[in-house]
Amino acid sequence: MAKKTSAKYKRYPAPKGSPKILVFDIETAPIIAHVWTLWENNVGLNQIECDWHVLSWSAKWKGAPDSEVMYMDNRGVKHVDDDTNLLIAIWELLDEADVVITQNGKSFDQKKLNARFVIKKIKDRHPPSSYKHEDTKIIAQRHFAFTSNKLEYMTDKLCVKYKKQKHKKFPGHEMWTECLKGNIEAWKEMEEYNKYDVLALEELYGILAPWHGNAGVNFNLYNDDEVNTCKCGGQIFIKNGFYYTNVSRFQRYKCKGCGAETRDRKNLLSKEKRDSLQTNTVR
């Protein structure tokens, strides 16, 4: 059964037989606490004046036009720490998604949102429908040894169209503090900053995904026909030698579009050949 959609944000219809893939990123407010030294890390609960909360989020359906990046923040609201409306909207997007793509989202964005969903009793504290999660930081850690696995470094070195934005008028922590003060110019910079994170992340995922191999999302699970579809959306594969195990040989293929590798599940070795290999193994 298809997941329910909300009319609040424009939906991009996924191609037939393709999953709905949501690229998203959140920005949170800092915890404001009373401390006595610059090096105080052990802050007690009774020292917290204002807990963290979601300031903004940006999201995009993978494959939708770049102009259709969605964004929502708490500018102009009476209580900036009341992130209820932000949470309802992003909950609905996650509930619709089959796959999500984040940068460091498994450690940060996903768990932070889950915490706020429960605290603010979003959708009666029910979790969004389950989804697959692709995290570019984890992909980078598994397959590469970049100088840094941060979005800023990887998009600067690898991406062409979009790169993570640097702070402009409000450098570093200042953008967050000015947003909390209601500075409309800071909010405008936050919007651009948050949107570019999503655009750069989508481009970065397209570069890293082919290296993730079988560990990534299997798009063929989302259609009922027998046409193989690569994670890049391509459907043209070229034979590329064989993949071997100790007792098996499988036909190997390479996607013509992105170079990602896949292979058949049919063992090409005859039963007699397999039996001889197993006998030799026992000896």
Image: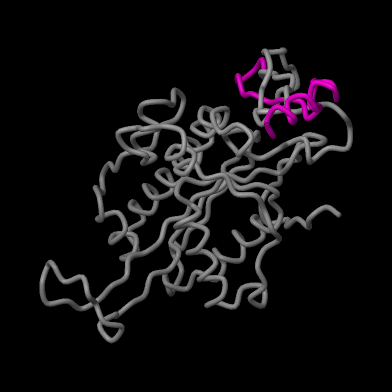
In this view, the residue in front, 226 or 172, is 226
Task: Name the spot of residue 130 as percent of width and height, x first.
Answer: 69, 58
Q: Quadrant of residue 84?
A: bottom right
- How did the renderer colour the structure? one colour
Residue drawn at 21 percent across, 70 percent down: 41
The C terminus sits in image quarter: top right
Residue drawn at 31 percent across, 65 percent down: 181
Q: Along the horizontal axis of the image, is 279 left or right of 111?
A: right
Task: Name the spot of residue 134 as percent of width and height, x first.
Answer: 57, 44
Q: Which residues are magenta?
A: 255-283
Q: Along the horizontal axis of the image, is 13 left or right of 256?
A: right
Task: Name the spot of residue 125 as percent of width and height, x first.
Answer: 63, 76
Q: Is residue 219 above or below residue 247?
A: below
Q: Is residue 112 above or below residue 71?
A: below
Task: Name the spot of residue 199 as percent of width and height, x first.
Answer: 50, 37
Residue drawn at 32 percent across, 70 percent down: 31
In this view, the residue in front, 200 or 182, is 200
What residue occupies the far front of the structure in this picture?
283
